[in-house]
Amino acid sequence: MKTLDPDSHDDGSPQTQSSLPARTLATRRVPDVLIKLAALPWARRRQRLTLAFEEVVVSLVQEMPIRAVSRRVGEHDTRLWRVVNHYMD
């Protein structure tokens, strides 16, 4: 019989560990429907980033190099340069 050390957290049962990856995309099948995009006065043409994301990028770029920001947010540095140039000009 196994004796337990009172300071040990091991109770003799098998241990399992579960975790989720930080970047998980939820995908669903969507029926074929017509989607209309509205032209908004604050939106730039062909821009797929949100204003909140752009705000985060601009604030990070003020403190870090572009390459470090691109690694942190998971976007290509060329796209980040476009955001920075838009707001800094």
Image (tube, rainbow, N blue to C red):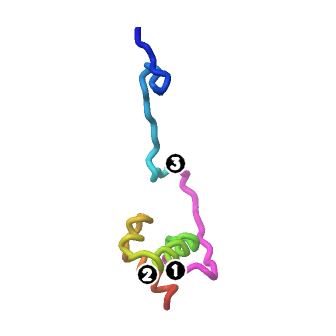
Q: CA distance from mark 2 to mark 3?
A: 31 Å
Q: Which residue is mark 3?
A: 28
Q: Nearer the viewer, residue 38 or 89?
A: 89
Which residue is at 42% across, 65% downward? 72
Q: Is residue 41 magenta?
A: yes
Q: In the displayed structure, would residue 41 be above or below residue 30?
A: below
Query: Callout 3, which amino acid?
Result: Arg
How packed mark 1 is, by other alpha carbons closer than 10 Å (few <14, some 14-19, many 20 or more), is few
The residue to which callout 2 is attached is 82
Which label was assigned to residue 45? Answer: 1
Q: In which image quadrant can residue 34 be found?
A: bottom right
Tell me what residue is drawn at x 57 percent, y 74 percent.
51
Position of 9 relative to 19 (above/below):
above
Element carrying mark 2: helix
- Tell me the element at label 1: loop
Residue type at tag 2? Arg
